[in-house]
Image (tube, helix red, strand yellow):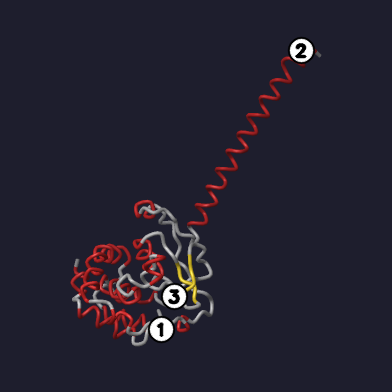
Amino acid sequence: METLKYTVLPFIKKSWIRLGLILVLCIILLQDSMMLSFSSKGIFYQGSSATLWEKQEAEKSPSLIPGKDLSDLPTYKGELARIPDEMREAYIRRFSHVAVGEMKKYDIPASIILANSLLHSEAGTRDMAVKGNNHFALPCTLDWLSKSDMYGGVCYRHFDNAWMSFRNHSVYLETPPFIHLKSLGTKDYKGWAKGLEEAKYSNYENLMQELISLIESYDLTRFDNR
């Protein structure tokens, strides 16, 4: 009994401590695994670095809310007109390289990306662009479990930086009812503008004409050739 008391029991106590530590480590690893699984199902990585975000390309295309008619989103006709021309040009210079990068990766015309962001963010001055880095008026969907906020009674996505908004816009256009537009290629900006209006990307009145007007006024097709 003395031998059992001084040799076996201490060994068992030490073993339980080790087993406890192993159990805690397993729980931590399991939590990390679950977070990675979530990020691949539409919960976009929240790191502030674009480089870190790029490493999380297990992202899945966010699906639209079944039966959701995007035509009920607010109309913002004419809001961009109040923005000085020099601010619009500065916005284009700031994000042109991002739009070109997204075009090369997702086959969306850079001209469409720039015109769409310029129009829906009001050259980066709109509340959701300033507060939430949402430059495309991207609405919440059922599988959007990341940051968001309400604007005009409608839920819109929030992002940690503008780059994440541009990337999410590219992924968003790979979902119905926009995915068929990819067949137009990167040179048919008029086809893309018409398609976005027909697919009710937003309730912006005359969306097609507004996009085409911005593209031609600022010669945005020059970026489609990069």
Q: To which residue does mark 2 refer?
A: 3
Viewer-nearest of discs 3 and 1: 1
Answer with mark 2 or mark 3, whichever residue precedes in sequence.
2
Q: Where is residue 201 shown, x and y percent of the image?
A: 40, 79
Q: Is 96 left or right of 120, judged from the image as shown?
A: left
Q: To which residue does mark 3 refer?
A: 176
Answer with mark 3 or mark 1, whichever residue precedes in sequence.
1
Marking on residue 194: none
Q: Where is residue 29 shown, x and y percent of the image?
A: 55, 43
Amino acid type, label 1 = Thr
Quick one: quadrant of the C terminus? bottom left
Viewer-nearest of discs 2 and 3: 2
- Total marks drawn? 3
- Residue at the spot 45% in from the left edge and 73% down from the top edge: 139
Density class for disc 1 (Cα within 10 Å; few <14, some 14-19, many ≥20) is few
Camera-side residue of 169 and 191: 169
Secondary structure of the residue carrying tag 1 is loop
